[in-house]
Image (cartoon, rainbow, N blue to C red):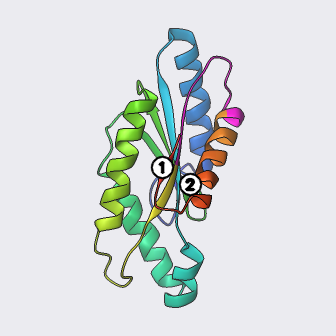
Amino acid sequence: MATMDMLTSINNRYKMDLALDEQIEISKRYKRPLSIIYFDIDRFKQVNDTYGHKVGDLVLIKLSSLVAKSLRKSDIFGRWGGEEFLIILPETTQNEAIQLAEKLRIKIETFKFKVIPKLTCSFGIVAYIENDSTESMMLKADKKLYKAKRNGRNRIEF
């Protein structure tokens, strides 16, 4: 089964599921920190409706490249779905993940995309706690992401 997202050339959801399972096992066994950043593009439907799906695709490609260039080699980055992305951060505390998410939030907000005037993202951050699973971490991250949306978008919740 292919593990790369064909549009963005980053990991796909299948690969991210496997990677998160593996990183949870490592964190559990060695008692090491692990955090995840789950984020999506604010009002992405509006981008597609206003500028068309081809522009929407170009935004996804550019955003993926922008984020990937801001990560360590040990970080695992992929597309979770449509306009949703996941970053798995081995050996990373929640506070360190918050710092990275804020850096990414600002980088995305201030980046000059060619066709669209501005883009923002909302972020949910979760740190591994004992007995977490991929499902429980993603559920918590999803709740944090939607809290960021409810609280005004272009923000981080943890």
Residue under label 2, please give it: 148
Which residue is pictured at 48% across the width and 49% down the height? 156
Report the side of 71 relative to 40 (left or right): left
Q: Nearer the viewer, residue 3 or 13?
A: 13
**Are discs 1 and 2 less than 8 Å apart at CB?**
yes
Disc 2 marks a residue whose amino acid type is: Ala
User: What secondary structure is found at the residue carrying circle 2?
Assistant: helix
Q: Is residue 10 above or below residue 119?
A: above
- Mark 1–mark 2 Cα distance, whole angstroms, equals 6 Å
Mark 1: amino acid:
Ile
Q: Is residue 53 above or below residue 17?
A: below
**Is 131 covered by the magenta stretch?**
yes
Regarding residue 1, the answer to whether it shows in the image is: no
Magenta stretch encompasses residue 156: no
Q: Residue at x 36, y 85 (%)?
A: 115
Q: Which mark is residue 156?
A: 1
Q: Secondary structure at mark 1?
A: strand
Q: Which residues are magenta?
A: 124-136
Q: Quadrant of residue 128?
A: top right
**Percent position of residue 53, x then y:** 54, 83
Q: Position of residue 74 (x, y in %)?
A: 37, 33
The number of numbered discs placed on residues in the rendered structure image is 2
- Above or below residue 60? Residue 91 is above
Q: Residues within 10 Å of mark 1 (few under 14, many from 20)?
A: many
**147 or 127, nearer to the observer:** 147
Q: Position of residue 2 (x, y in %)?
A: 58, 51
Q: Residue at x 37, y 32 (%)?
A: 96
Q: Position of residue 15 (x, y in %)?
A: 57, 43
